[in-house]
Structure formats: C-alpha cells, structure tokens
Amino acid sequence: MNLPALETRNATLAQKIADKLSIRGADLGAKMRRAGRRLPRRLRREGRYLVQAELLAGHPKLAKQIDPARVDAAYRDFDAHLDPIDPNDLWWGWTLGVLAGIVFNLLLFAALLIALLAWRGDIGLG
C-alpha cells in the first residue's frame, strides 16, 4: 500500500465518521478515540489498524508489514456499518430519550405529591 492512497482513504473515512456520527477531530486517529463505544469493538480494532497502517506506510521498509487485504476489509466493514446510519435519526432518538426522562420524572413527582396529600388527609381518595 502506498502512503497517498492510505491517507486519502483514511481522510474519506474520517469525514464519513464526522458526517454520520457527528464526531469532531483532526484526523482518523482522533475521531476513533472520540468515537469510543459508538462503534463496535471490531470496528474500533480495525480503525486502530488503519491508523497504524498509515503510520507504517510512511516508512519504506515498514510498509511491507501492511496487509492490503485487511485494509480493504476494514474499509468495507466501516462502509457497511456507517452507510445505514441516519444522523437525523440519532438526533431524534437522543431528543426523545431526554424528553422521556423528563416526562417520567414529572409523572413520578405528581404521583408522590398525590400520595403525600392523601396521606396528610388534604385530599380524599376513597
């Protein structure tokens, strides 16, 4: 593998991660670190390999250690994982999760308030 091809592919992958998962970072390595558990363990491992491969590709003798088949498989795996992700759907899921938590807490508070008022005898429940 040559260095310009790896750099281009890693930059493309980094941009795709930024677009789909809204993760900021300077390069693929930084985005992989920030992604954390948003990516499956297998993809985190492959992402570390891609970053390492880019570093190795810069050295003529070490570049021979890069497995082109594994690099291609890693890119295919990332594409297969990231393509179906809809950033708007992630945002709506997060928003609805926050709203659901707020509504649950308000209902719990109302139930406790009614129980307290009934216990004190301020309201009659039966």
Image: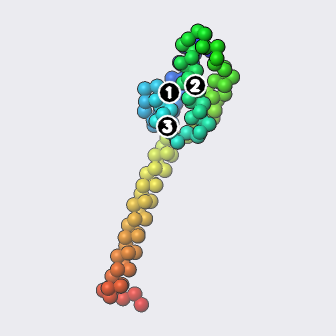
* Coloration mode: rainbow
- The structure residue drawn at horizontal position 60% and vertical position 13%, both measured from the top left corner, is 62
Q: Quadrant of the C terminus?
A: bottom left
Q: Is residue 78 left or right of residue 93?
A: right
Q: Amino acid at mark 2?
A: Leu
Relative depth, front residue between 7 and 51: 51
Q: Residues within 10 Å of mark 2 (few under 14, many from 20)?
A: many
Answer whether labels 1 and 2 touch (C-beta < 8 Å). Answer: yes
Q: Secondary structure at mark 2?
A: helix
Could you tell which of marks 1 and 2 lies nearer the N-terminus? 1
Q: Amino acid at mark 1?
A: Leu
Q: Residues within 10 Å of mark 1 (few under 14, many from 20)?
A: many
User: What is the spatial separation of the Cα atoms under label 2 and label 3, in whole angstroms?
Assistant: 15 Å
Rendered position, 53 above or below 103: above
- The structure residue drawn at horizontal position 52% and vertical position 42%, both measured from the top left corner, is 37
Can residue 19 be seen at all in this image of the molecule?
Answer: no
Location of residue 5 by image quarter: top right
Can residue 24 be seen at all in this image of the molecule?
Answer: yes
Could you tell which of marks 3 and 1 lies nearer the N-terminus? 1
Q: How many marks?
A: 3
Q: Is residue 117 left or right of residue 87?
A: left
Relative depth, front residue between 81 and 71: 71
Q: Which residue is mark 1?
A: 28
Q: Which mark is residue 50?
A: 2
Residue 17 at what x, y percent from top left? 51, 33
Rendered position, 87 above or below 96: above
Location of residue 116 by image quarter: bottom left
Could you tell which of marks 2 and 3 lies nearer the N-terminus? 3
Location of residue 13 by image quarter: top right
- The structure residue drawn at horizontal position 55% and vertical position 39%, both measured from the top left corner, is 39
Q: Which residue is mark 3?
A: 35
Residue 78 at what x, y percent from top left? 60, 32
